[in-house]
Each structure stands twice: as C-alpha cells, then as structure tokens.
Amino acid sequence: KAGVTQTPRYLIKTRGQQVTLSCSPISGHRSVSWYQQTPGQGLQFLFEYFSETQRNKGNFPGRFSGRQFSNSRSEMNVSTLELGDSALYLCASSLAGAVTEAFFGQGTRLTVV
Amino acid sequence: KNEVEQSPQNLTAQEGEFITINCSYSVGISALHWLQQHPGGGIVSLFMLSSGKKKHGRLIATINIQEKHSSLHITASHPRDSAVYICAVPSNTGTASKLTFGTGTRLQVTL
C-alpha cells in the first residue's frame, strides 16, 4: 500500500511569489490535513479537507488556502510569500480525521528568500 | 497554557537504557497519538490509543484518561531510536479534525 506522497520535497521561492504544494493520500483515505512546522512554533494546524470540503481551518492568514480533488488528492497554496513562511509543510491522511490513525508524508521544505 | 505538554524536552540515554517520555493534556479526548520524527523531517505514527496500553516491539504506550496523562516507553534503547517523539491529541470541538501537538521530546541514544 503506497504511503502519503508530498511533492515537491524541497522548494526555494522569492518573497512575493506564490507556491503550490501537493499531497496524495493513502488510497481510500478521505481526510487530508495540512500542518506547518517551524523551529519557533512547532507543528501547527493549517486546515483539513474531507470529501472535497474544508472541515476546519487553523489560525493562519488568508494567503494560505487549499483544496481537495475528487480523488482525495489535496493542494495547498500560499500567495505573496513572506520570509516567515519558510517551514516544513506536512500533510497527513486518515480515514476520518484526527480520531483515526494519521499517516504523514515526508513533507515539503519551503525556503523563502 | 498549552493544551498538550511533554516532558522532558531533551533526553540523552545510553544504549540499552529504559526510556520514558510523558505527555499531559488539559482537555477531554477520545484518542491520543504518539509520533516519531527523524532528522529528515518525515513523521511516523507510532500509536493511537484511547485506553490502556499498546505495545509494538520495544515500544509501549500507556494512557490514563482520568488523569489526562500518557507515557511512551522504549525498552532496551538503541541509537536508531534517536529522534523527536511527539504526542498529539484531536481537538475536542466540532468534527475533531485537527491535531494539537506537544512540543516534542528530543531523544539521543548513544553507544
């Protein structure tokens, strides 16, 4: 059974640009959650999608957005990048959300210069 | 106050030692996750438990729902166990679709 796949693994962008990250969940999983990890703030919840609907959103500005497709693959987009957006972005897939076992991808390490 | 607190923050052990990492949470939960993160960044789910005890190889996780406390034990520790261990709990509102994480315990096992 294939695991959670995140692409790309590494990304360098310039301030003001936008970026799109992709997450392919485990087959059959309908929930995809996104998290940001920084040395200062640790792991923080961005949003969760379930069956193409955003079910929950963390405390992040509107520059952070996401979507989920009918095959459960999810993308997150960050517009007008700031230096502080440099982080490891992780997605987790599960059958039904945080009360079921979560499987994480390897993450996308975004560096904003 | 964080909803999830872990101790210790850092832990150094010699190979073969028995290790305990603690996690306390302040809200009622239906399940608790223990995760492992290696320096490369990827996170591996070790356990999800809602009561009692679970064991997988040299790893044991316990939870006491009444005391809002969980522990992760590693028996006969090995250098390959060196990683950051994180506990996480689902939110207790709405659809419980998000995890709140502890700050992690950085474990270094030396020969």
Image (spheres, rainbow, N blue to C red):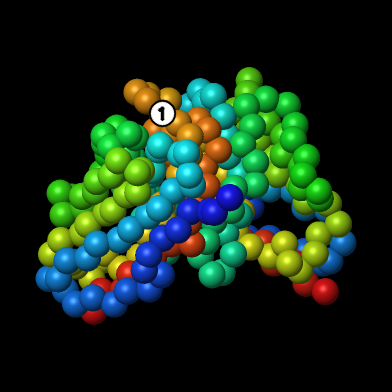
Q: Position of residue A23 (x, y in %)?
A: 37, 55
How many C-alpha atoms fall within 10 Å of the one at disc 1: few (<14), some, or many (≥20)? Answer: some
Seen from the viewer's position, the closer of residues B38 and A33 is A33
Q: Position of residue A35 (x, y in %)?
A: 38, 51
Residue at image x 47%, y 39%? A28
The C terminus of chain A appears in which quarter of the rendering? bottom left
Would you identify the image quadrant in which residue B36 lies? bottom right
Q: Vertical placement of A70 versus A42: above or below?
A: above
Task: Give the side of residue B75 with respect to residue B84, left or right.
Answer: right
Residue at image x 81%, y 59%? B77
Residue at image x 52%, y 61%? B42
Seen from the viewer's position, the closer of residues A5 and B110 is A5
- The kind of secondary structure element at disc 1 is loop
Q: Position of residue A97 (x, y in %)?
A: 44, 34
Residue at image x 83%, y 74%? B111
**In the displayed image of the protein, which residue is found farthest to the top?**
B66
Task: Give the side of residue A66 with respect to residue A3, left or right.
Answer: left
Q: Vertical placement of A96 versus A65: above or below?
A: above
Seen from the viewer's position, the closer of residues A73 and A89 is A73
Seen from the viewer's position, the closer of residues B10 and B48 is B48
Would you identify the image quadrant in which residue B10 lies? bottom right
Q: Vertical placement of B101 versus B9: above or below?
A: above
Residue A37 appears in the figure? no
The three-letter code of the residue at mark 1 reads Ala
Q: Position of residue B76 (x, y in %)?
A: 86, 57
Reading the image, the residue beneath label 1 is B96
Residue B34 appears in the figure? yes
User: How many numbered badges does the structure rendering display?
Assistant: 1
Subunit of label 1: B
